Image (tube, helix red, strand yellow):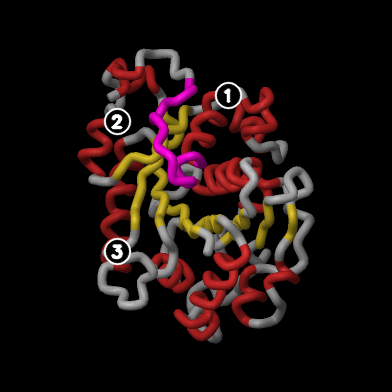
Amino acid sequence: MGKSYIVTSFKGGVGKTTLSANLAMSLARRGHRVVAVDCDLESRCLDIVLGLENATLFNLCDCIKGTCTIDNAIVRDTRCENLYFISAPAFYPERHEIGMTADSFSKEAITALVKELTNRFDYVIFDLPARPDNLYRNLAQLVDAALVISLHTAASIRAAEKTAIALNELTGYGKDNLTAGGLDIRLIVNGFKPKDAKDGVNVGLYDIISKTKMQLWGVVPFSISMSKGQEMGKLAYELYRGTTPFCKAVENIATRCEGYKVPLFDGVDTGVKKKQVF
């Protein structure tokens, strides 16, 4: 059975979708069968970041409602034979959980979805919205781990802390939780600016860990080239032949997903001494 992850934060604009897409591609390029699932029914941007906005016919909600099979909804990324994608609907009028939504996103329906995907894929990456809905709440109780994303700012770090607290509340009492002892919650700091940490302009990594009380699983440096490349539908491995610090940092996270230990900044050129950012 494959591993399943939710990528989340209660704060928007922290790079959840960017990390979801690049992590999924990194794992796929390492030989794993991976499916990235857009669960953000409000914003729906994972298809754009993956460059697959015109490739889908059916979507996640069609699968859950039984309108189509997962095979109908899955799209393979032509750049990597191991990477697959399921989109969110272009328009979802039942977003506010009225009408059929409560039935469609029942625990039983989401359990069946997660079970089928983890049976077919090595890794399942669920890209979640900033605001929890019924789909979010059920997924949080069924996946193996949560990757909470934070920017290198005080407001974003606080949002990450609140996200972790809420996830514990959601899953701590779930008798059907698939992970013994509760959900495994890990922190990824995105848009990290080493010089700001060194100069004391922003908090260092030790302070971030102590504030959020989460295990730090990745530090992704701020990247102008990544921002520009994303507008063209390019992922990190496609920019400068995958040699950017952003790409190396994502590859380190993928290595940790595989169960290997690797230093936070392994192969990542931050421009400052590593000890100066802690």
State the separation of the CA atoms marked 1 and 2: 21 Å
- The residue carrying mark 3 is 182
Q: Amino acid at mark 1?
A: Thr
Q: Are marks 1 and 3 in contact (CB under 8 Å)?
A: no
Relative height, residue 70 to residue 260 (above, below): below
Left or right of 141 on screen, residue 3: right
Q: Residue at x 46, y 57 (%)?
A: 6
Return the residue at label 2. Answer: 205
Of circles 1 and 3, the one toward us is 3
- Dot 3 falls on a residue whose secondary structure is loop
Please name the amino acid that badge 2 sits on.
Leu
Residue at 52% in and 24% down: 245
Q: Which residue is mark 1?
A: 244
Asked if 205 appears above or below 127 in the picture, the reply is above
Give the camera-side residue of 215 and 161: 215
Residue 221 location (% of width, % of height): 46, 28
Q: Is 148 part of what is drawn in magenta?
A: no
> Looking at numbered disc 3 in the image, what kind of residue is underneath it?
Gly
Q: Residue at x 55, y 55 (%)?
A: 123
Q: Which segment did they paint magenta?
A: 254-268
Image marks 1 and 2: residues in contact by CB distance under 8 Å: no
Real-space Cα distance between discs 1 and 3?
35 Å
Prevailing secondary structure of the magenta residues: loop
Q: Position of residue 157 (x, y in %)?
A: 31, 41
